[in-house]
Every structure is written in structure tokens, then in C-alpha cells.
Amino acid sequence: MKGLEKFFGLDFQNRQLLKTALTPSSYANEHNIESNERLEFVGDAVLDLIMARYLYEKDNHYNEGDLTKRRARYVCEAALVEFAKACDLGQYVLLGHGEEKSGGRDRHALLADAFEAFVGAVFLDKGLEEVYKVADKVVFPFIEEEEEISFIDFKSHLQELVQSDKRQLDYRVVSEEGPSHNKLFTIRVYMDEILMGEGSGRTKKEAEQHAAEVALKKLAKKSLKF
């Protein structure tokens, strides 16, 4: 953990916060300690705030809708994974023997959650200005270089496609499988009660994106006109 602090030029006062940030629910359940889920909640809010400020100041020609889309692109799971990889966060995450053997350190959901929790821990320990040490090191350079993050916001594209005709979209959870720390969600998207697509993912957001992608492909294939 010292290596992580050194990378960002941080010096935690409350080292337990840092340890908790690097404790996924699977490890926490095995050892009966607090997981990083609550810190994820804080980190998510902090990242939204600093990203909003950064984009607002950087691009004054973008309207609210544009800014919202750009922020979503850079706080999605795919982007969070890239931020985590940039500081080699995976090597510091606490894992049980089984998850270690199964390649848990490379699991995207684990890396994304750990990065959000780490940001939350920095904020609670040092305040917002110290969070900018993290952002300046791995977040903002990523945006400046306009690196590809292999992410398309299929939900937004689908919404834009149907909203002009006042159609309604509804995402419904079909099933949840697996243990709490490694669930697989299956979600269906309906347009005015018509089933348009089904997708699965390790998070509900990921499953929704996959369902929306299927729906868009179906619409393109059938060349439906609304």
C-alpha cells in the first residue's frame, strides 16, 4: 500500500480507510471485516463532481446534454478500469486464495469498484484537493489523450432513437445468479411492452447496456420506422 501512496504523493492519516478501500466484499465476508462498498458510494459522488468541474472548465461550447454524456463516458466501468490499471491498483487489492487463483486481480468489476473506493478514501482522509492528485495522475491525462475505452453508451443511443416518437423504454431484471460478490444479472429492455433485447452482465448497468445494444441491432436489421 505504501507503493500506491508513493505513486500519487499521498500520506494517509487514517490507514484503515486505505485498507478498507482495497477490501472487496468477497474478502470482507471471508474475514468478517468491512468491505469497500460504502467507500465506493463516496468515491462515485466525488468522481462525478471533479469530472463535472473539469469538463465544464475545459469545454465551454458544450451544452448540458453534451457534458452529461461526456461525464458518463469517463466515469463508466470501462474508464474506471483504465484508471485502476494506470496505477496498478490490482496488485494492492486484498483477495482470498480462491479469487487470487481465478484471476480476480484482473476482474473489471473489482478494479472499477476498488478505484472508486480508493478515491472515496482519499477524499475522506485528505479532502477534495488531495483527490486531484489522483485525477491529475491517471484521470485527466486519459481524457487529454483521447484514448479509446471501447465503450459505447448504447442506452443513450436507444433512448435518443425512440424518444422523438414518444415511445417508452423499460429495463427489467429477469434474473440474478451467483454469490453476492460475483453476481450475473440478466435484464430485458421493452419498448411500449414490446421485448426489444436481453443482455447479461456483472452489474445491472452492464446488463442494461448489452440489452440496449441487442435492441439497436434489432432495429437496424428490421429498419423499423417510428
Image (cartoon, grey):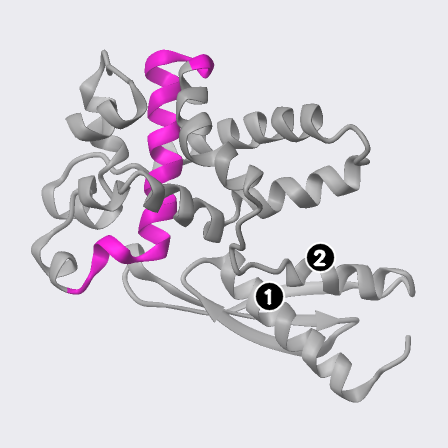
Which span is picked out in magenta? Answer: 102-129
139 left or right of 121 in image = right
Say if residue 137 shows up in the picture. yes
Q: Which residue is mark 1?
A: 172
Query: At 33% across and 31% down in the image, what residue appears?
Result: 118
Query: Residue 220: x, y in percent?
Result: 76, 81
Instruction: Say which quarter of the image contains residue 160.
Output: bottom right
Query: Residue 47: x, y in percent?
Result: 51, 31
Q: Is residue 111 magenta?
A: yes
> In the structure shown, which secondary structural element does the residue marked by tag 1 occupy?
strand
Going by the numbered disc 1, the residue's amino acid type is: Arg
Query: Residue 202: x, y in percent?
Result: 40, 62
Numbered circle sitting on residue 157: none
Q: Residue furthest bottom?
A: 222
> In the structure shown, which secondary structural element does the residue marked by tag 2 occupy?
helix
Q: Few, some or many C-alpha atoms within 10 Å of disc 2 (few <14, some 14-19, many ≥20)?
A: few
In the rendered image, the vertical position of residue 27 relative to residue 5, given as above or below: below
> Considering the image in quadrants, where does the N terminus appear?
top left
